[in-house]
Image (tube, grey):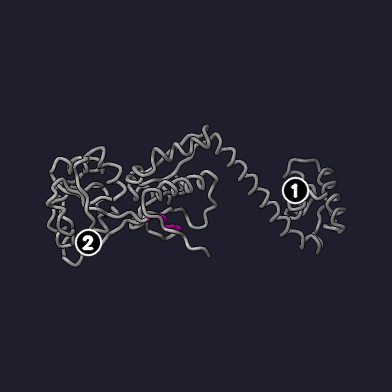
């Protein structure tokens, strides 16, 4: 019966050119290595090495076997790592990137979903803004994330859009909501906007700048704040209006500003939410689980994007 141990002994002997050197490298006695090679030769019905002085040279059969042996051992190591990941999923730490607003859609419920399946794990949701999350991805601190697409520099990243979230205009003054919120109308509005630290890269502001491009103006902010909750509260106080994702409005207005009204922009504008990970990455079971659950939560609130079957 051919074994992984036999193949490992074969490859080391092939690489070292000596049974003695192979034994030293693997930490076995030389007769043990010889026995493994003889057993492999018997199973395959071929001679693998020819003795030359104190060393050995590979036969044609050994040359043919080598790439197969390498692939077999690599596959076995991949399987070992995969099983280790499964074990870690039961008791380890799961880290997943999530830009700030997305936590309103999926944060607490996503963690609850994970713990319902794997009560022994520790969960970390990492990131405030998509720029932060993207940097963590690039540096390998996290395997995958959910991110707002306009902020993603896609070089080296696989970007899978999963949902569209409409951007809506919110105001405590009903008069501000009667006429369509066109680019010209928006350019005249007095706004409070969140994500002030990341204002140059914030996905919502990128969409609004593109919308206002024809007017030659940028959105005029009266107030700058960091988090969308504070922006919504200030709108509720009548101090300014704002533009936020519809999902965030549905989550926050009933709780923080129940009398605030909502209107669509004209033409309709959307943020695109995507799953992102490094190109070619072999995602762990933990990362795949978070992608599955986060996608499900986001698509329950925003408009799903169905992936085309290939």
Residue 262 in sight:
yes
User: Nearer the observer, disc 2 or disc 1?
Assistant: 2
Quarter of the image for residue 69 reads bottom right
Q: In the current view of this chain or complex, which residue is farthest to the top?
A: 120
Given residues 124 and 257, the one toward you in this image is 257
Magenta region: which residues?
158-163
Q: Secondary structure at mark 1?
A: helix
* Mark linked to residue 4: 1
Given residues 244 and 136, the one toward you in this image is 244
* Mark linked to residue 266: 2
Q: Secondary structure at mark 2?
A: loop
Relative side of 187 to 100, left or right: left
- Name which residue lies at 83% across and 57% down: 48
Q: Residue 162: within the magenta?
A: yes
Residue 21 in sight:
no
Q: Position of residue 32 (x, y in %)?
A: 82, 43
Q: Position of residue 99 (x, y in %)?
A: 35, 47
Given residues 239 and 136, the one toward you in this image is 239
- Name which residue lies at 50% across and 35% down: 116
Quarter of the image for residue 303 reads bottom left
């Amino acid at each position: 019966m051919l074994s992984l141990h036999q193949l490992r002994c074969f490859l080391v002997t092939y690489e070292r050119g000596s049974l003695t050197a192979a034994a030293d490298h693997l930490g076995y006695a030389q007769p043990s290595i010889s026995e493994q090679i003889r057993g492999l030769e018997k199973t395959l019905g071929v001679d693998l090495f020819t003795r030359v002085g104190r060393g050995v040279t590979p036969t044609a059969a050994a040359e043919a076997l080598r790439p197969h042996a390498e692939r077999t051992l690599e596959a076995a190591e991949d399987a070992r790592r995969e099983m280790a990941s499964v074990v870690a999923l039961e008791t380890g730490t799961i880290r997943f990137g999530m830009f700030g607003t997305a936590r309103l859609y999926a944060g607490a419920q996503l963690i609850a979903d994970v713990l319902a399946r794997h009560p022994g794990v520790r969960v970390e949701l990492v990131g405030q803004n998509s720029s932060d999350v993207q940097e963590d991805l690039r540096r390998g601190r996290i395997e995958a994330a959910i991110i707002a697409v306009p902020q993603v520099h896609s070089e080296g990243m696989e970007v899978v859009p999963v949902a569209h979230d409409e951007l809506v205009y919110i105001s405590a003054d009903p008069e501000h909501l009667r006429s369509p919120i066109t680019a010209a109308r928006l350019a005249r509005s007095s706004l409070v906007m969140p994500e002030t630290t990341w204002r140059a890269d914030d996905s919502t502001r990128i969409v609004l700048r593109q919308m206002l491009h024809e007017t030659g103006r940028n959105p005029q902010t009266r107030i700058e704040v960091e988090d969308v909750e504070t922006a919504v509260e200030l709108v509720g106080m009548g101090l300014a209006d704002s533009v936020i994702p519809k999902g965030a409005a549905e989550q926050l207005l009933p709780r923080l500003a129940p009398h605030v009204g909502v209107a669509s922009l004209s033409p309709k504008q959307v943020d695109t939410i995507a799953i992102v990970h490094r190109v070619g990455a072999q995602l762990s079971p933990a990362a795949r689980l978070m992608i599955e659950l986060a996608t499900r939560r986001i698509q329950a609130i925003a408009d799903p994007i169905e992936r085309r079957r290939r």
